[in-house]
Amino acid sequence: MESQHFILHKPIHPITAEKDPLRLESDITALCNKATALGAGGVAVAGPEDLVFSDEIISKVKADSNYPSIHWPIDYPADDLKKAILAFRKGIFLYIDAPPDMPDYGGGPIPDRNHLNIYVKLHEMVAHIESAAFYMGHYLAMGFAAGNCRSVFCTEEGRCTAAVRTNGCTAPYKGRPSMAAAGIDAIKTAQKIRLQLPGADSSFLAGLVMVA
Amino acid sequence: MDTLNPGTPDPEKMETLRNVAIIHGASAAMVIHAKDIPVDPRVRFKCMIPKCYMSGRCAHCPPYGYSMEKTRNILKNYNQAIFFHVRVESAIIAAKNISSVIASGMADDAGNLYSLGGHYMLVYTLVDMIRKKAMKLGFSATEGFSAGNCKDVLCYLKQSCRKLNGNGKCRKPDISIPSMESVGIDVFLLAAKTGWHVFPIGGQCEPEFVKRGMLMGLVLVA
């Protein structure tokens, strides 16, 4: 059953050959407002120059692969994800608050139901904003959440079904790769865009939607 | 015609190829320059993030199929192309639940799955017809691109893509071709530049929200 988060953005805009900068600004503002309305603790606009990539983070994700999925670690040898992300002009960085006691689950299972729900909320929020951007005419919009989507949506599955060549993803409308799996340092990126993250005694999960 | 530059296809022959598309069912067709075909690394990722139900399940679909580099090299070898579209009524292409019907492979009572499949088949057929006509007209090489994934159109009743999961041999090598999007061609942008009104239609879309849908095909000739 689809979540109530998935409400189609209307009207659906036709795709234009030239991107109107004013319309892009207006769409970005609308998407930021949507993120806030959906429960983001903080939202800021990020350009490709603001994204901080780290090989160390990618290595950490690869090392933490006891619970592999199609999005953890990301392994597309024929394609360059960083290059694709840097082809965008604007994106939206957001975070949601989490309980202070929530550990960093990395790519592993999330046994605590409350913690799991926070991951679900972030994935749904990112998917919703990405979908809204798509129907605004930004058809290449690409969303990143946190953690391993298999830990969030496929806890009952023995393995990631999308990783099997004859099967598909069980949660294609919600499951997104994490920023970490894409090699993006969420904390340094937030610092660069001057987005105030929760303090040391708090916890949070961050997401990113590259729009156009 | 002696007004042509060396290596430039004869306009009359290009018009003949364009007419092949129109006569046999394309809603519109254009002669375009190969250099105007946009490629973008984000396009192939749109098949993988979020993961399309066919991504990784067909030899032509990302992460398999042509890399961006291969696509760019192919485009360099061609001068012109026939770019066409087949109109699909929004009641079919944006039918309620059509995405889940397609992904499940279970035919719906309204017949939208088979109707949409027929439109896709027409695109494959038109690409094939244009390529064959081009060779008869004396072109030395062609390359064809379709829409969607070939597994659902050409091997719908088979459990899996044989090239990927079987003995490595495609069941329909004569007609099976990659889609434009699977090789990184930004087909939406190309359509918009061509002047066609193209709408983003995804799984949440419904017929009343878009005027029409279209499936597009491309044949490069040299």
Image (cartoon, helix red, strand yellow):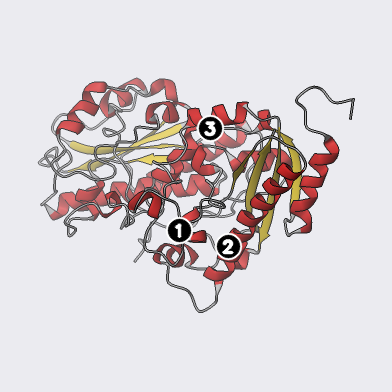
**Three-letter code for the amino acid on which mark 1 is drawn:** Ile
Q: Is residue B203 above or below residue B157?
A: above
* Image x and y of residue B13, in percent: 81, 40
For label 3, the crowd category at 10 Å Cα-Cα, with few meaning under 14, some 14 to 19 and many 20 or more, is some
Measured Cα–Cα span from mark 1 to mark 3: 36 Å
Residue at numbered disc 2: B93
Q: In the image, what residue occupies the spot 55% across and 33% down?
A: A25
User: Residue A90's mark?
Assistant: none
Instruction: Indicate left or right for B204 with B88 as reference.
Output: left
Q: Please name the amino acid that badge 2 sits on.
A: Ile
**Mark 1, residue position:** A7
**Residue that label 3 marks:** B71
Q: Residues within 10 Å of mark 2 (few under 14, many from 20)?
A: many
Mark 1 vs mark 2: tell me if same chain: no
Quarter residue B140 falls in: top right
Q: Which quarter of the rendered picture does the N terminus of chain B lie within?
A: top right
Q: Is residue A123 left or right of residue B205?
A: left
Q: CA distance from mark 1 to mark 2?
A: 19 Å
Amino acid carrying label 3: it is: Thr
- Give the camera-side residue of B159 and B117: B159
Circle 3: element type: helix
* Whole-percent x, y for residue B207 in the image: 59, 65
Q: Are marks 3 and 2 in contact (CB under 8 Å)?
A: no
Residue at 60% of width from left, 65% of height from top? B118
In the image, what residue occupies the spot 41% across and 64% down?
Answer: B158
Q: Is residue B104 above or below residue B186?
A: below
Residue at position x 26%, y 47% from top? A149
At numbered mark 2, what does the secondary structure look like: helix, strand or loop?
Answer: helix
Disc 3 from disc 2: Cα separation:
28 Å
Q: Position of residue B14 (x, y in %)?
A: 79, 40
Quadrant (top left, top right, bottom left, bottom right) of the C terminus of chain B: top right
